[in-house]
Image (cartoon, helix red, strand yellow):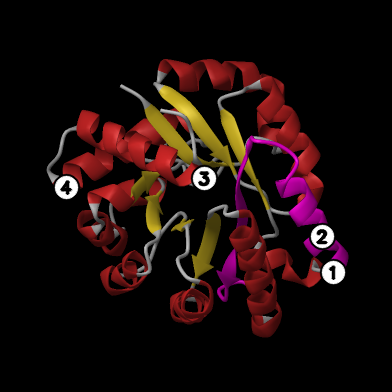
């Protein structure tokens, strides 16, 4: 059985002491590919270093919405240049909107649209962070699609309602679930996991955050635990773990251009 963790942050200091052991565990769990997200371009060198060290890692470059105030014209060119720098760059992001922790709404929108433009120019998918901003993300993407055609991307660590889930499925996006889907009281997320079309479903850890049940008490999440996310979704959908693993692996390969 093969699994793909479609969103990780392995360059954080918490992984530095034992990254080789962490890798051994994800290999033992059947994780054959990982997508390393990027919070800001300054991370690029460290992420690229990990990808060179562990070739199963593909990675993104972009600016997180909570860092939108760092955006400059030079950064736009920097992201564009870095995204062209090698075949292991498989996405732009993470980008999007976060109205839960910040209120610089216009700045976030501008930065999001700038990164959509980069993704469109390079024909790369976008990794979208969306927190308390589903209506605004939908509006931006609808207008973008009207002007520029189809959008490739994923709503990562999805926590929205079933209605919001349907919005983004209608836009052609993938929906990725993290360890939050395993939480006892996450009824809204679980309802969404039941309605996502099979060919638009992804799984992730968003490690080192959001360790799933039964590892929720641990201070650090890691890619091996994506199996628990797959198990939870299989139970919610009345499918086998093997079927969810096969489908989400196929979907990730299609979205991020991994060889099957």
Cβ atoms under marks 2 and 1 closer than 8 Å:
yes
- Image coordinates for residue 28, horizontal then vertical, percent: 43, 15
Residue 82's disc number: none
Cβ atoms under marks 4 and 3 closer than 8 Å:
no
Residue 77's disc number: 2
Decide which of 33, 219 is in the foreground and name it: 33
Residue shown at the point (32%, 69%) measured from the top left: 170
Q: Quadrant for the N terminus, please.
A: top left
In the picture of the structure, the residue carrying the numbered disc 4 is 237
Q: Nearer the viewer, mark 2 or mark 4?
A: 2
Answer with mark 1 or mark 4, whichever residue precedes in sequence: 1
Q: Identify the element where label 4 is drawn.
A: helix
Decide which of 248, 187 is in the foreground and name it: 248
Q: Is residue 62 visible?
A: yes
- The Cα–Cα distance between marks 3 and 2, rounded to whole angstroms, is 27 Å
Q: Identify the element where label 1 is drawn.
A: helix
- The Cα–Cα distance between marks 4 and 3, rounded to whole angstroms, is 22 Å
Residue 54 in the image: above or below residue 127 = above
Answer with mark 3 or mark 2, whichever residue precedes in sequence: 2
Range shown magenta? 72-101
Q: Nearer the viewer, mark 1 or mark 4?
A: 1
Residue 204 in the image: above or below residue 94 = above
In the picture of the structure, the residue carrying the numbered disc 1 is 73
Residue 11: in magenta span: no
Residue 206's disc number: 3
Residue 87: in magenta span: yes
């Amino acid at each position: 059985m093969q699994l793909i963790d479609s969103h990780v942050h392995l360059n954080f200091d918490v992984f530095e002491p034992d990254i080789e052991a962490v890798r051994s565990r994800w290999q033992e769990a059947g994780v054959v590919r990982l997508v390393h997200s990027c919070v800001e371009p300054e991370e690029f060198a460290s992420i690229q270093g990990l990808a060179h060290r562990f070739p199963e890692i593909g990675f993104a470059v972009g600016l997180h919405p909570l860092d939108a105030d760092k955006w400059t014209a030079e950064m736009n060119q920097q992201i564009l240049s870095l995204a062209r720098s090698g075949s292991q760059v498989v996405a732009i992001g993470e980008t999007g909107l976060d109205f839960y922790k910040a209120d610089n709404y216009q700045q976030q929108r501008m930065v999001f649209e700038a990164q959509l433009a980069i993704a469109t120019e390079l024909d790369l998918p976008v990794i979208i962070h969306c927190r308390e901003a589903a209506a605004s993300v939908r509006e931006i993407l609808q207008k973008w699609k009207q002007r520029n055609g189809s959008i490739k991307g994923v709503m990562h660590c999805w926590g929205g309602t079933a209605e919001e889930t349907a919005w983004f499925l209608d836009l052609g996006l993938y929906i990725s679930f993290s360890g939050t889907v395993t939480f006892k009281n996450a009824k809204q997320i679980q309802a969404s996991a039941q309605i996502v079309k099979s060919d638009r479903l992804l799984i992730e850890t968003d490690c080192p955050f959001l360790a799933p049940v039964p590892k929720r008490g641990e201070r650090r999440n890691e890619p091996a635990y994506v199996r628990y996310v797959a198990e939870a979704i299989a139970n919610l959908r009345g499918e086998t773990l093997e079927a969810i693993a096969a489908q989400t692996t196929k979907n990730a390969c299609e979205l991020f251009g991994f060889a099957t």
